[in-house]
Image: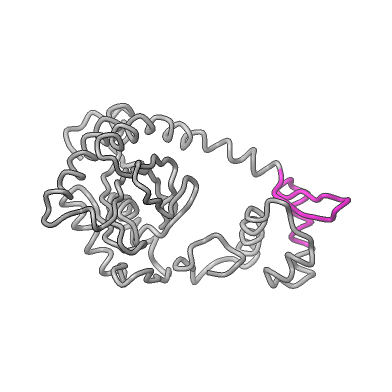
Amino acid sequence: MTATRNTPPNVQSTTGVKSAERALDLMEYLASHRSGATFPQISQDLGFPKSSLHALLGTLVGRGWISLDEQRRRYRIGVRVWETAQSFDYLDSLARRAEPHLRAARDELNETVQLAVLDGIDNVYIAKVEADHPLRLVSRVGMRLPAYATGLGKVLLAHLDPADLRARIEGVSMRRFTQHTVATWQQLLERVQDIRERGFGEDDGEYTPGVFCVAVPVRDGTGRVVAAMSCSIPRVRLGEGPAHRDHLVDTLTRHCEAMSRDLGWQGGGQ
């Protein structure tokens, strides 16, 4: 991962429009520098030609996507970002609708439960409730992780149209975070096919060593999978055999079906 982007290091497109890539790099960079950054700092950290950076900043300031503190000569994210973010009321509503179901699952299992949606080939966490145990996961609300390396993400990928899935992964490289991470796209396609057949996904130390996760889809009123709910536990608490895992899956499935019904789904199984 470079110091200039929030995009996961495993996801690097081999195609793209350079000016658009630079604009997005700049926005992501400023989003991670809440106190703002000066022109020399941005130029040094991002490595853009100064003439190109000057023109890019001028355009984005003029459109309100970036603001400039004239006295301190520091650039920061502008008000247009906030305005555009208001279009994501749906995700906020989805997170609020999910909260009682997440809490109910957490209370029943006493394990951390999370909800995520798919963005490209990343899963983005939109809600999370912690267990009483001292274990704290690396995930947090707003964080994105590569979908192929998480149980949540693989569930979300599994419910894409196959052509859509292949289009998303075309030209994208993969990174192995642990020895258990899916290593190839062919291996991922085999995993998602298995998820379609079983109705749930797993992550056995694929992103965080020693953490086991199961995940189940959440549907909206049309039957479309719009999110996935997961439960994560230390591998040492899982026990031998499938009994504990099956209990986690059954519990999550009940709560996901309840949430799906709240969203208008009237189907008879995940």
Occupied quadrant, residue 180: bottom left
Number of marks in picture:
0
Q: Is residue 100 left or right of residue 126?
A: left
Depth check: 155 or 104 in front? 104
Q: Which residues are magenta?
A: 55-78
As drawn, 82 above or below 183: above
Depth check: 66 or 208 in front? 208
Q: Is residue 150 left or right of residue 197?
A: right
Residue at 31%, 31% (x, y): give it: 221
Which quarter of the rendered picture does the C terminus lie within? top left
Occupied quadrant, residue 87: top right
User: How was this image coloured?
Assistant: one colour
Residue at 44%, 42% (x, y): give it: 126
As for residue 69 lying within the magenta part, the answer is yes
Residue at 79%, 69% (x, y): give it: 51
Q: Is residue 65 left or right of residue 133?
A: right
Occupied quadrant, residue 106: top left
Q: Position of residue 6 (x, y in %)?
A: 55, 60
Q: Is residue 181 left or right of residue 77?
A: left
Residue at 34%, 33% (x, y): give it: 103
**As drawn, which residue projects farthest toward the front?**
134
